[in-house]
Image (cartoon, rainbow, N blue to C red):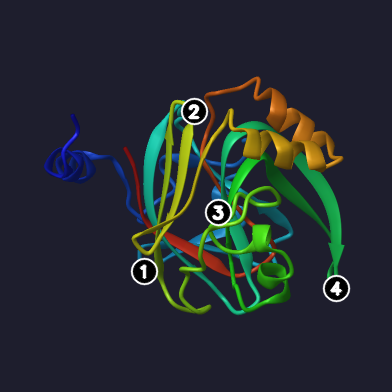
Amino acid sequence: MITRRHALLALSAAPLLDGTSFDGFRTPTGETSPAVSWRIVNGAYETIPDARRQCDLWTVAEYEQFDLHFEWRVAPGANTGIKYLIQRSATDRLKDAQGEFLHETSLGFEFQLVDDASTAGSDQPNHASGALYNYLPPTERAARPAGEWNSGRLVLRGEDVEHWINGRRVLAFSLHSQELKAALALKKLNSARMLERLEKRKSAIAFQHHESAVAFRAIRVL
């Protein structure tokens, strides 16, 4: 039986992605350094919102199960997430006011993190912070307002997944649950079919770059 004391000891001994370098991270394609689209400021990994190559930040290590602890912050209107059970990556050519840019993204499940007061966070329940993005809504809204730091936790153990925000478990589901199967079936998307199959069960964990100002710090993977 894993006690709270054992869990705390394990947490204190876990490798810390400590916000002093990009050691332990890579980009989805590995063609560039994370520094092309992320910077390190006061121990936090921050996106460069207007970077011309915007890359998700992947852990070098791959995990079949894990207990991820982290802190996160989004600017007003910002949108990000933690990607896991990643099946593949993609590089898209997008445009903004400055012209074309490249976006290296991750195709997998997403623990949504967003400014809940924004349109992106309030248009649908399954787009709120803590949701399994596009599929399952959180049981409550536990995130603090944009600009404030939050704690987060993402647990994958066997078939069971938990999303936590600020010490509150806001979503728990099984990868084989009827609820998830029904939610995936509703979406007429190739990505939903890929997540139904889940051919890869071991992958990196990705911190999403979504063309907006977000930051992560105090990242530990048990």
Query: Which kind of residue does numbered mark 1 sit on?
Result: Asn
- Look at mark 4 in the image and give the residue it sits on: 97
Mark 3 in CB contact with mark 4 (< 8 angstroms): no
Q: Is residue 140 visible?
A: yes
Identify which residue is drawn at 54% across, 29% down: 203
Give residue 35's mark: 3
- Asked if disc 2 and disc 4 are in contact, CB closer than 8 Å, the reply is no
* Residue 42 marker: 1
| Residue type at numbered disc 4 | Ala
Q: Residue tagged by mark 2? A: 159
The alpha-carbon separation of the residues under discs 3 and 1 comes to 15 Å
Which of the 4 quarters of the picture holds residue 72? bottom left
Identity of the residue furthest to the front in this view: 178
The kind of residue on which mark 3 rests is Ala
How far is the residue under mark 3 from the one under mark 4?
22 Å
| Gap between marks 2 and 4 measured at Cα | 43 Å
Q: CA–CA distance between discs 3 and 2?
A: 34 Å
Q: Is residue 1 left or right of residue 101?
A: left
Label 4 and label 1: CA atoms lie apart by 30 Å
Name the one closer to the observer, 178 or 18: 178
Q: Say which of marks 3 and 1 sits in front.
A: 1
Secondary structure of the residue carrying numbered label 1: loop
Q: Residue at x 69, y 32 (%)?
A: 195
Residue occupying image coordinates x 18% and y 29%:
1
Between discs 3 and 4, the one toward the N terminus: 3
Q: Secondary structure at mark 3?
A: helix
So how many labels did they put on this image? 4
Q: Amino acid at mark 2?
A: Glu
